[in-house]
Image: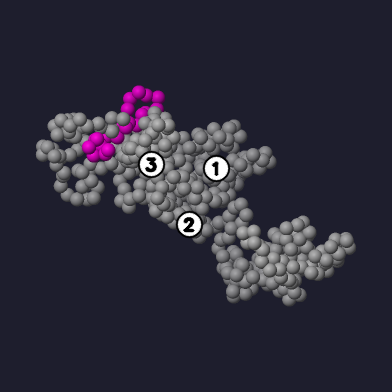
Amino acid sequence: METMKIRGCHPRILRAVQGLYTDLRRVFRLNGAAGQWWTSSNGLVQGDPISMVMLNSLVTCVIESTNRIPVEGLTVRSYADDLSSVVVGRSPEEAKNKLRSVHAAMRSYVAAGCGELNDKKCFTFGNAFAKGILNPSFQHLQQFRIVGGSLVVRDDSSFLTQLENTRWSKWKNSIRRIRRVPLGWKERAKMMLTTQSQACFAQGTHGLVENREYLKQIRSDIMRSLWNMDAYSCSPLVTMALLVPVQLDPEFGCIYEGLRAIMRFMRNLNVAAEIRRRFFDTMQVPVDGPTARLRTLSQSAVLGELIYKLINGDFNEDEWLHMLREAWRNHLWNRVSRERSHHYAGAHEVDRIRTMKWYNQLQQVADNTIADTDDMEISQARAQLGVLRTIFAGGLLTPDRALRHRNKGGHHLCRCGLERESVEHVSWRCMQYISKPTKCIISKTFLYARGSTCVCPICCNYSNGEQSF
């Protein structure tokens, strides 16, 4: 009240506030039931504009006090009841003295009875020399979170800071817990995508992390959770490109969310002009931030052209995001056609609509979105979906392939006893299978090349009516 009076607050406002605090009583209400009234003698009443004016009037006392300190390189800021100070010194001793002078003003404020410090929420940040110089109980942090972004300091682009490790670990734990949720494939994939923000928060505010080995470990956790198996033989690249939203791929997820954030920044024409200026400024090399990320991605053969579309402002937002996703899907297909050429040779570009047509029809039945479907038909559709996903991802094992996958010697002979039980033998030469009226699921399961009528079968798997349904 006294600080507001000194600052020239009108007496009518002061009288109203004084009347409020003269006989201030409060009550707790829970589920519509009120407890007993009690007299309150501490804190500010919040919820109206005058409470913020009173709080600012108190906190400003500290800032005004530090402004009178006759030193340079000292900045004190406030947000509500939080205070921060940044000091710059030519030597550690000079910086230490400036920090101590700011903290002395804060101690005087507390000693005057204007408030109190919460030691658990007080910390120093930056160079290690600041640790413990103000109070041994204050934490010294290498990272902290700010509203809408984060500050990170890394040695190189492959180095994950403590903050980034914490975020990725949090999402990794969520992925592992989702594996235990008794829901289907589609729902679990959706839950993982929803919780991805735990790892990708504020991606657009700093440079791109290129630690692919670590992201590969995250992808492995996603695969184990989706397929609900510890040792899987399914292709992670096909799974991400075809069976789930492609931004669930950790490597692309952080790129995608970062570019979405930058795209939103650039809705402001002034911000877009500044980013464009920094991007094309060859005299300055950005160390971190959105410009560093954009420059890194612009050199990529996968996304480079789309980055220049973003910089030049020549795009529709929804269409541009769709092009990003499609470009990454094609990148994954290119990779899998090289890395798993014995399964996916020629599948460097796939027509998802034609390939997924039967899958989507089964999904509609499994989700019970088609009228006149009985429980038996729904159960059968769900079973077929599981087999179909495994075929697409190259993970449906023949007995012979299962032996090799588990590093066991020898071959598994077909029931006819003539050859080992390979896909080729079962499909074309085995009299045991030919004599049975079986319906081969793989006859409907092809990867359709874009713009072509030819098909690329996944020749590593088979499933007949006797084994699958």
Q: Is residue 51 above or below residue 451?
A: below
Which residue is at 23% across, 39% downward? 467
**Residue position marked by numbered label 1 in the rendering:** 259
Closer to viewer: mark 3 or mark 1:
3
Expressed as whole percent of the image width and height from the top left, the position of residue 188 reads 43, 47
Q: Secondary structure at mark 1?
A: helix
Q: Amino acid at mark 3?
A: Thr
Dominant secondary structure (helix, strand or loop) of the stretch shown in magenta: loop
**Residue 35, percent across and down?**
66, 66
- Amino acid at dot 2: Lys
Q: Earlier in the sequence, mark 2 or mark 3?
A: 2
**On the image, numbered disc 2 is attached to which residue?**
170
Tell which circle, 2 or 1, labels the residue nearer the N-terminal end: 2
Q: Which residue is mark 3?
A: 239
Which residue is rendered at x = 13% and y = 32% of the image? 431
The answer to whether residue 55 shows anywhere in this view is yes
Residue 53, above or below 378:
below
Point out residue 76 in the picture as x, y percentages from the top left corner: 71, 63
Q: In percent of the image, x 71 and y 60: which residue is there?
A: 80
Quadrant occupied by the C terminus: top left
Residue sitting at the far top: 453
Density class for disc 3 (Cα within 10 Å; few <14, some 14-19, many ≥20) is: many
Relative to the observer, which residue lies in front, 151 or 468? Answer: 468
Three-letter code for the amino acid on which mark 1 is drawn? Leu
CB-based contact (under 8 Å), mark 2 and mark 3 = no
Whether 44 is drawn above or below 297: the answer is: below
Residue 73 falls in image quadrant: bottom right
Side of 393 where 431 appears, left or right: left
* CA distance separating discs 2 and 3: 23 Å
Image quarter (top left, top right, bottom left or bottom right) of the N terminus: bottom right
